[in-house]
Image (cartoon, helix red, strand yellow):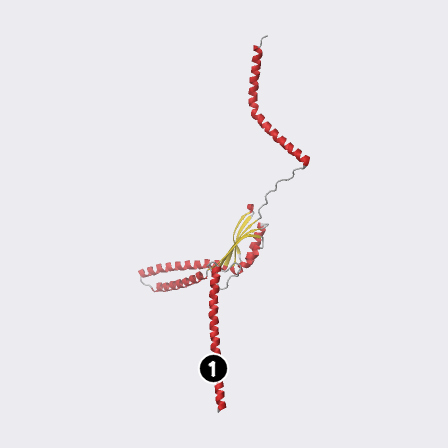
């Protein structure tokens, strides 16, 4: 009998211990979930501060999965051959599923501007690839989290679709002409609103799916011309300098002579007349 009681007590203790362990595990799991949520909130707050409040990812970080991110980059580069570098950049974007959206070439100035649309999930990879074509002078990378806008548009579109569906059903059951005209007008207005929302959604999805890389390629600036330093040393140098000075002096003298020649002619005529008159007045 005593042995039976001891067995029952041991079994009860084991059940109690198992229940306590399960409760403890459940409590630990709940606390870990809460701490994970808190950590996620803290991490989100820290990243938001580092992003400057835009909700975008830090520069150089991969695009966050499950979020709607708009990524852009503006890069100014110096390359040896702008034509070859632009073709390489276009080929790199095309091979990754992107395309050339805009191009402006000023070959006389040695500059080509490209706007490349590339898949957002390969944005940083392709940016690194195109920046290897030359020397980066300036680079500006920006990301913007538009997840809230995407969700808001989806909600508004769903509500608009439901509203349009109900109006169409009401239009089918309308028998009064006045009521029919009113329903048709309201249906047309709501369909226009729905099309506007769908257009906004398409534009936003395009910006999210394809990042933009604006690339400015230019050749290195031409070096300033070096002054000719071929002066001859010693006697030859002095002779060359004297000859140059003689040419300059001769040029100046000829210029002065040309300026004074009309005056010399007038003065010479006056002196000649004076001499002739003086000889005639002289006594024999």
Given residues 97 and 82, the one toward you in this image is: 82
- Quarter of the image for residue 192 reads bottom left
Q: Quick check: can you spot residue 238? A: yes
**How far across and how far down the image is residue 238, in percent?**
66, 34
Q: Is residue 102 above or below residue 269?
A: below
**How far across and how far down the image is residue 116, in percent?**
52, 55
Which residue is the extreme one toward the bottom? 1
Label 1: how many Cα within 10 Å (few below 14, some 14–19, many 20+)? few
Task: Identify the residue shown where x is 49% and y is 90%.
Answer: 4
Q: Quick check: can you spot residue 96? A: no
Quadrant position of the C terminus in the picture: top right
Residue receiving disc 1: 16
Residue at disc 1, secondary structure: helix
**How far across and how far down the image is residue 211, in percent?**
51, 57
- Quarter of the image for residue 259 reads top right
Which residue is the extreme one toward the top? 284
Q: Is residue 168 above or below residue 250?
A: below
Task: Identify the residue shown where x is 47% and y is 72%.
Answer: 31
């Amino acid at each position: 009998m005593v042995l039976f009681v001891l067995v029952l007590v041991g079994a009860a203790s084991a059940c109690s211990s198992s229940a306590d362990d399960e409760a403890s595990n459940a409590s630990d799991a709940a606390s870990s979930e809460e701490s994970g949520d808190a950590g996620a909130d803290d991490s989100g707050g820290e990243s938001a501060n580092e992003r400057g409040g835009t909700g975008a990812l830090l520069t150089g970080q991969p695009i966050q999965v499950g979020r709607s991110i708009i990524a852009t980059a503006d890069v100014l580069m110096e390359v040896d051959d702008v034509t070859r570098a632009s073709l390489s950049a276009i080929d790199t974007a095309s091979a990754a599923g992107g395309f050339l959206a805009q191009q402006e070439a000023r070959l006389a100035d040695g500059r080509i501007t490209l706007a490349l649309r590339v898949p957002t999930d390969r944005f940083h990879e392709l940016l690194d690839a195109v920046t290897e074509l030359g020397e980066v002078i300036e680079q500006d990378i920006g990301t913007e989290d538009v997840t809230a806008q995407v969700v808001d548009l989806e909600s508004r579109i769903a509500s608009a679709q439901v509203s349009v569906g109900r109006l169409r059903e009401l239009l089918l059951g309308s028998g009064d002409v006045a009521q029919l005209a009113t329903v048709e007008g309201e249906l047309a207005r709501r369909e226009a609103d729905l099309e506007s929302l769908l257009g906004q959604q398409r534009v936003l999805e395009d910006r999210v799916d394809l990042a933009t890389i604006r690339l400015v390629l230019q050749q290195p600036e031409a070096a300033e011309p070096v002054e000719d330093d071929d002066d001859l040393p010693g006697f030859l140098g002095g002779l060359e300098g004297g000859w140059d000075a003689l040419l300059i002096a001769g040029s100046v003298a000829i210029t002065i002579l040309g300026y004074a020649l009309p005056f010399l002619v007038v003065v010479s005529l006056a002196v000649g007349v004076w001499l002739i008159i003086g000889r005639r007045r002289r006594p024999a």
